[in-house]
Image (tube, rainbow, N blue to C red):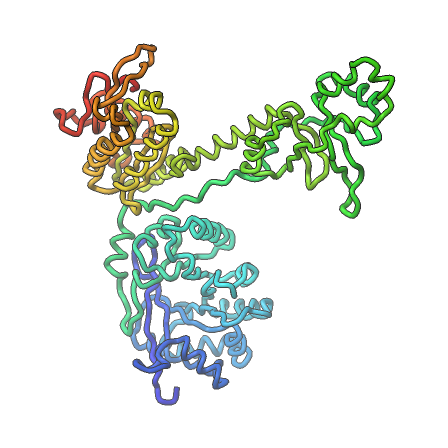
Amino acid sequence: MRQGGLRAVFQPIVDLKSAAVHAHEALIRGPEDSPLHRPDALLRAAQDEGLLYEFELFCLQVALRRWGALRQPGRLFLNISANALSRLVDVGGTTLLAQGIRNLQVSPRKVVLEITEHERVHDVDALCEVSRALQSEGLALALDDFGDGRSSLRLWSQLKPDIVKIDKYFSHDIHESADRLKTLQALLQIADVFGTSLVAEGIEHEAELRVIRDLGVTYGQGWLLGRPGAEVSAEPAREAVGVLLDTRVAVLPEQRYVAQRGQLRHLSIIDAPTLTPATSNDEAAAMFQANPGLHAMAVLEGTLQGDGGGDRPIAILNRQQFMDHYATLYFREIHGRKSCIKHANREPRLIERNFDIEELVGILTSQDQRYLSDGFIVTDNGRYVGLGTGDQLVRSVTELRLEAARHANPLTSLPGNIPISLHMQRLLDSGGAFTVCYLDLDNFKPFNDHYGYWRGDEMIRLLARLAAAHSDPQRDFVGHVGGDDFMILFQSEDWRSRCERIIATFARQARELYDEEGRTRGGVEAEDRQGVRRFFPCTTVSIGAVRVAGGEYRDAEELATKASLSKHEAKLAGGLHVMGEVAAPARALSHQDNGAHADA
């Protein structure tokens, strides 16, 4: 510090909407080629010497003096810990601090004090008083590295900073991490509530920048946008500008869809009378006779201890089975006054209201299928709520499975109809050019009927692999509509050649799924849709394409309908069909033949 060995460098903070430099962050460097060159080493050394407060103030002075000499018009971000800031204000007051900044030829209104935490802030209330005083002098506040473990939502809420900088962990590989994407989306919602602008730190790759831009983050910082330097960057790095001005949208990572817990709310729970082990057979029979529509009744043990009360089910009494016993000769005389528990199922199927879909599927596939006749008992934290029937359970699980498939196809794990529609709408909203391609298999039903569903699933997975392999994961979105229908939303300019490669490669590899006789004959014998048995050539793929230049479609539904029409035209012509183009002469990759379109 005495020898003037510290110098300031400046890294740009970029407005991701305008692709212009919004501000610079001042960073301190020690002598080059020395152990104290990096700021983390300088901070450790200052702490070891007991000079951390003095060191932080000295760094502020170095950065402000250099910035004032450069006479730059933009904002300057300065790092300071909460403890150092509070101590500085206590010693000299905010007015003196603002005057000191002016003396170094910098306007306080151009300064953003970036609170960096070496330790968690303990006295948030005191820091809030300091921040209000600073803001009255025109200084802005920012929170640094939010989400690194030391920052807190309470600090954000109470401090109400102008800007929050999100830790680089959330930017790193965000184009491949659905969890980080969802976290950043949640932080954007919080920022909207608090009126805060966000800065995404640590952006190093174009794919990261494209996702962060599309999410609507206001500012970005990182080596891709501009590296720290002694001179001020007037513009972001060329590579970053290219991404920011590109109309193509990012392909957002998909989070595996998990059925929401609490789906049993869709079930109509039967509010049925209950039994206890002390209930006699005569009493149980009378209750069934009084409730003719009741399929079963639960047997409850009694009040639970220490948990606020409630009744725990221990068995279920099936109406049909019990009444069959009750109607036998001399049953009433011998067993009428005895406990009904003897004829109950002591291992009833219990379903908590918050069971998820996987737990429900486990019930359906278990060896014990008595739930189909007995039904099941619905509980809430172990307490009896009511009864459900087997058909209700099957219907509920089916609905959940269908809903899950709309998000991610269970066979291929590719995004389903909902993500496809959402991405298509994002492409339409961007106003850029893209191509929608609808893929469908020809002669797939005869293949599936001849070889069985297992090999049919292999054929579908083959098309899924080829669609993904011939698409750019950073530009193109591959989705599984259902069955043997797929959709690719291309932003790659060479989409046509990619489609042609899919068609040619599939035609070659699909033959390997036929047995030797099928490959030799070039197809199989099977019944057509009219029940007539005839020959069907080997399965191929047709692709219908729709070019979108921007503005001609109102919404994703209209565009999807047009893509479906193009797909039907492709199946009639064979190969690739582009909506609006004059059909080209048949080429080698087309698959026109007498039976190619029987399942169109």
Q: Is residue 500 above or below residue 241?
A: above
Report whether 41 appears left or right of 241. Answer: right
| Residue 544 visible (yes or no) | no
User: Which percent across, then down, holds residue 15?
Assistant: 34, 57
Identify the residue at image location x=41%, y=71%: 78
Q: Quadrant of residue 397?
A: top right
| Number of numbered discs on residues | 0
In the foreground, 71 or 281 = 281
Q: Is residue 469 above or below residue 77?
A: above
User: On the rendered image, what quadrant is the N terminus found in?
Assistant: bottom left
In the foreground, 103 or 368 = 368
In the foreground, 74 or 444 = 444
User: Which percent across, then down, holds residue 584?
Assistant: 14, 26
In the foreground, 507 or 88 = 507
Identify the residue at image location x=31%, y=54%: 18
User: Which percent across, then down, holds residue 481?
Assistant: 37, 31
Report whether 389 appears left or right of 395. Answer: right
Report whether 207 appears left or right of 259. Answer: left
User: Which percent across, then down, holds residue 360?
Assistant: 57, 34
Identify the residue at image location x=29%, y=20%: 600
| Residue 111 visible (yes or no) | yes
Q: Quadrant of residue 573?
A: top left
Identify the residue at image location x=47%, y=64%: 143
**What is the residue that sits farthest to the bottom in this orientation?**
2
